[in-house]
């Protein structure tokens, strides 16, 4: 496919996915379309439960929500030949191309999920102006995963068209539920990267300037996402207060003490209680309270320290107010250190690309959290190399913002850099 045609196709894919955003473990329409394109390109496919460990899917929507979304996806353009593989919400894809020539196994990860954000309806918001704004209220691709999916399909197209120039095995991993750091661990546990020698994850934007490239982003914080529930005993606050076990007080005590956790001397820590829900009436002692909490640490061991402190506080608060408690881990991410040797290869690929003005081998700037780190850790543990690269672009607004949008000129150069890395790495033994 000619460069101009490929660029147009990537944009078309992105605009299609942008209009139909799907959140974590509900990417049924998206995954079915991706699978059909990859199948047509000649990749061997492993879909759904074959590449996801059911017990390691954190924060997965319940059966009712999943069934409702399945019906929605069928009514909104899902490919019916592939939808059954994803109908239970296990929406991962591993597409493999065997070149029949000896060489390494190279894997690339692309995430697919959207966010619970209502997209801007302002006339100067480009997706609105150009006619591809989200069609779904309070759902939006506000982080660029529609772009990532489309870049993955662009890479698949170049790989399939140039198979005779490649050696080894190439795996393209389309991951659900990156938001909330929920989806990667299940694919790792299903051995999606057990045989991988080189692993590359990527992201668009994140503050990197347009036409700039970062080959290794080391700034991810380890994180834990916790749903905490206190279960007490309801009672009338006026006539029988002594019979109640106040779950709201247990939760409130926990919140105050969570924010008092000592910082760690060996690196940065973060803690946030984003939600507290409790009570059913002013004269009823609350029998249940729920918290949504996240911890972060500069390293996985520092995050473990913060998480253990949270858990100890919850136990103490529950004991103090004589309630039961439950802590559900609904998301996790690790810290990472990218493999410099692999980053150097990507840096070379970027510097050879005419669209890139400046390329950096690494960045250690803080970059939130990412569950691609589970893939990276697994590959590195098995003796392989892994990195996380960033394609700089112009942003209309920051990530997770209702006006988020990216410069579509970035797409083709991103595909070309990744494809050049396939060429270089496939020649290594």
Image (cartoon, rainbow, N blue to C red):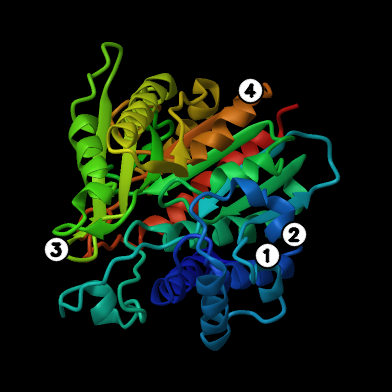
For marks 2 and 3 on the same chain, the one whose residue lies earlier in the sequence: 2
Q: What element carries label 3?
A: loop
Residue 335: x and y, percent?
43, 28
For marks 2 and 1 on the same chain, the one whose residue lies earlier in the sequence: 1
Residue 339: x and y, percent?
52, 23
Q: Is mark 1 on a helix, strand or loop?
A: helix
For marks 4 and 2, give the one nearer the viewer: 4
Q: Which mark is residue 80?
A: none
Q: Distance between the residues labelled 3 and 4?
A: 54 Å
Above/below status of 40 relative to 390: below
**CB of mark 4 within 8 Å of CB of mark 2?**
no
Q: Distance between the residues labelled 2 and 3?
A: 56 Å
Residue toward you, 131 or 308: 308
For marks 1 and 3 on the same chain, the one whose residue lies earlier in the sequence: 1
For marks 1 and 4 on the same chain, the one whose residue lies earlier in the sequence: 1
Above/below status of 95 relative to 208: below
For marks 1 and 4, give the one nearer the viewer: 4
Query: Residue placed at 23% from the left, 80% from the top?
Result: 129
Residue at image mark 2: 45
Kindly indicate the quadrant of the structure image that contains residue 197. Answer: top right
Q: Distance between the residues labelled 4 and 2?
A: 25 Å
Q: How crowded is mark 2: few (under 14 residues within 10 Å), some or many (20 or more)?
A: some
Above/below status of 352 relative to 340: below
Q: Which residue lies furthest to the front in this view?
A: 239
Residue at image mark 1: 38
For marks 3 and 4, give the one nearer the viewer: 3
Residue at image mark 3: 282
Q: How far apart are marks 2 and 1 (CA)?
A: 8 Å
**CB of mark 2 within 8 Å of CB of mark 3?**
no
**CB of mark 3 within 8 Å of CB of mark 4?**
no
For marks 2 and 3, give the one nearer the viewer: 3
Residue at image mark 4: 381
């Amino acid at each position: 496919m000619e460069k101009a045609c490929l660029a147009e196709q990537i944009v078309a894919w992105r605009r299609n996915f942008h209009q139909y955003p799907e959140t974590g473990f509900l990417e049924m329409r998206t995954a079915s379309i991706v699978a059909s394109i990859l199948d047509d390109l000649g990749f061997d496919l492993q879909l759904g439960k074959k590449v996801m460990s059911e017990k390691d899917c954190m924060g997965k929507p319940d059966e009712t929500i999943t069934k409702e979304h399945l019906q929605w996806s069928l009514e909104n353009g899902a490919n019916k030949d592939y939808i059954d593989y994803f109908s239970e919400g296990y929406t991962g894809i591993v597409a493999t191309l065997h070149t029949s020539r000896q060489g390494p196994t190279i894997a690339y990860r692309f995430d697919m999920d959207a966010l619970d954000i209502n997209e801007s309806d302002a006339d100067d918001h480009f997706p609105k102006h150009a006619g591809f704004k989200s069609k779904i209220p309070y759902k939006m691709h506000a982080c660029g995963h529609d772009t990532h999916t489309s870049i993955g399909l662009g890479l698949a197209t170049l790989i399939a068209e140039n198979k005779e120039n490649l050696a080894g095995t190439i795996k393209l991993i389309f991951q659900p539920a990156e938001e909330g750091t929920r989806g990667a661990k299940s694919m790792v546990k299903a051995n999606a990267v057990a045989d991988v020698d080189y692993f590359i994850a990527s992201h668009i934007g994140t503050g990197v300037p347009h036409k700039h490239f970062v080959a290794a982003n080391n700034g991810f914080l380890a994180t834990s996402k916790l749903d905490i529930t206190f279960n007490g005993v309801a009672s009338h606050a006026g006539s029988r207060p002594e019979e109640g076990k106040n779950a709201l007080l247990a939760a409130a005590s926990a919140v105050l003490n969570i924010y008092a956790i000592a910082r760690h001397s060996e690196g940065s820590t973060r803690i946030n209680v984003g939600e507290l829900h409790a009570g059913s009436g002013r004269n009823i002692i609350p029998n249940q309270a729920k918290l949504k909490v996240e911890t972060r640490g500069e390293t996985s061991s520092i995050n473990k320290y913060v998480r253990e402190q949270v858990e100890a506080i919850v136990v103490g608060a529950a004991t103090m107010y004589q309630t039961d408690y439950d802590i559900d881990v609904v998301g996790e991410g690790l810290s990472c250190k990218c493999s410099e040797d692999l980053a150097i290869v990507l840096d070379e690929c970027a510097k050879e690309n005419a669209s890139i003005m400046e390329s950096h081998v690494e960045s250690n700037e803080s970059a939130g959290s990412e569950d691609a780190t589970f893939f990276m850790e697994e590959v590195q543990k098995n003796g392989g190399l892994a990195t996380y690269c960033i394609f700089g672009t112009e942003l209309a607004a920051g990530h997770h913002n209702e006006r988020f949008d990216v410069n579509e000129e970035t797409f083709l150069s991103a595909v070309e850099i990744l494809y050049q890395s396939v060429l270089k790495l496939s020649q290594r033994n």
